[in-house]
Amino acid sequence: MSSHPEVPRHIAIIMDGNGRWAKERGLPRLEGHRSGAESVREVMEACIELGVEYLTLYAFSSENWSRPEAEVNALMALLDRFLDEKAKDLDRQQVRLLAIGQLDRLPESTRALIERIKTRTADHKAMTLVLALSYGGREEIVSAARSLASDAAAGKISPEAIDSDLFASRLQTAGIPDPDLLIRTSGEMRVSNFLLWQISYAEIVIVKKFWPDFRQGDLFETIKEYQRRHRRFGAL
Ligand code: FPP
């Protein structure tokens, strides 16, 4: 597959099913997450090759904090390792890293690593990788509403000035185009608090496979499905 005008500019993925993948094999859940990190590497490579401009991955939701402490710690350690190993690749691949979510809830080491890589990759142009970490769509919307309310209360803006564009500019995704394609693996038909505002017009493709089994070929299939659909943005 070569770059094509119909290649989605922004792909967002809910990477679901790591735990079930591991369970099916009698392995600890962490093995599922490890293998899921491999899928991340493959999908990133494919997106760069295809000319996808933005790839947003739901790596850790606000709800994930309520998982057993050992799993949360293991996921954070995996994320640290991924970022540490990826730092050089991101330079080589000219990928810019961004992160959205309540990052202040992350361990200090993870936050520092993200900050360092963000600064280092800020000018890269091949693709933007957006990691959603400790992310919740409702929390993001509430925070935008709070920031606008506070400006209105201080007399900096009038309530009438609040429109979609101004609202979107207070989201953490300000400046990032909305996703064209939302992929969710493991067959679940839910949005699970992911990019609630931003996916208004996204094509949603649900894939039955668990995330660790989702590799380059599966990504090509979802893009083909996306291309088959007629995109009308609600117009007749
Ligand atoms: C969902 O599977 C996946 C997660 C909660 C974490 C996703 C993390 C990775 C793919 C690896 C690390 C991330 C990066 C960016 C390297 P689940 O545990 O909810 O699976 P289940 O629904 O089958 O239990």
Image (tube, grey):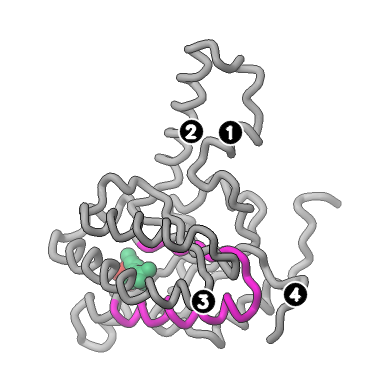
How crowded pointer 1 is (Cα within 10 Å; few <14, some 14-19, many 20+) is rated as some
Front: mark 4 or 1 = 1
Query: Mark 3 or mark 1, which is nearer the start of the sequence?
Result: 3
Q: Which residue is mark 3?
A: 93
Q: CA–CA distance between discs 4 and 1?
A: 32 Å
Query: Mark 3 or mark 4, which is nearer the start of the sequence?
Result: 3
Residue 135 % position (x, y): 38, 51
Q: CA–CA distance between discs 3 and 2?
A: 33 Å
Residue 73 % position (x, y): 17, 63
Front: mark 1 or 3 = 3
Q: Nearer the viewer, residue 31 or 21?
A: 31
How crowded pointer 3 is (Cα within 10 Å; few <14, some 14-19, many 20+) is rated as some
User: What SS does tag 1 mark?
Assistant: helix
User: What SS does tag 2 mark?
Assistant: helix
Q: Residue at x 37, y 74 (%)?
A: 86
Q: CA–CA distance between discs 2 and 1?
A: 7 Å
Q: Which residue is mark 1?
A: 167
Q: Is residue 56 magenta?
A: yes
Front: mark 4 or 3 = 3
Highlighted magenta segment, given as a residue range? 34-59
Q: Are marks 2 and 1 in contact (CB under 8 Å)?
A: yes
On screen, residue 115 versus residue 45, left or right, reads left
Query: Mark 4 or mark 2, which is nearer the start of the sequence?
Result: 2
Q: Which residue is mark 2?
A: 144
Q: Is residue 167 magenta?
A: no
137 in relation to 64, above or below? above
- State which image quarter holds ligand 1: bottom left
Residue 87 % position (x, y): 38, 71
Q: Which residue is mark 4?
A: 228
User: What SS does tag 3 mark?
Assistant: loop
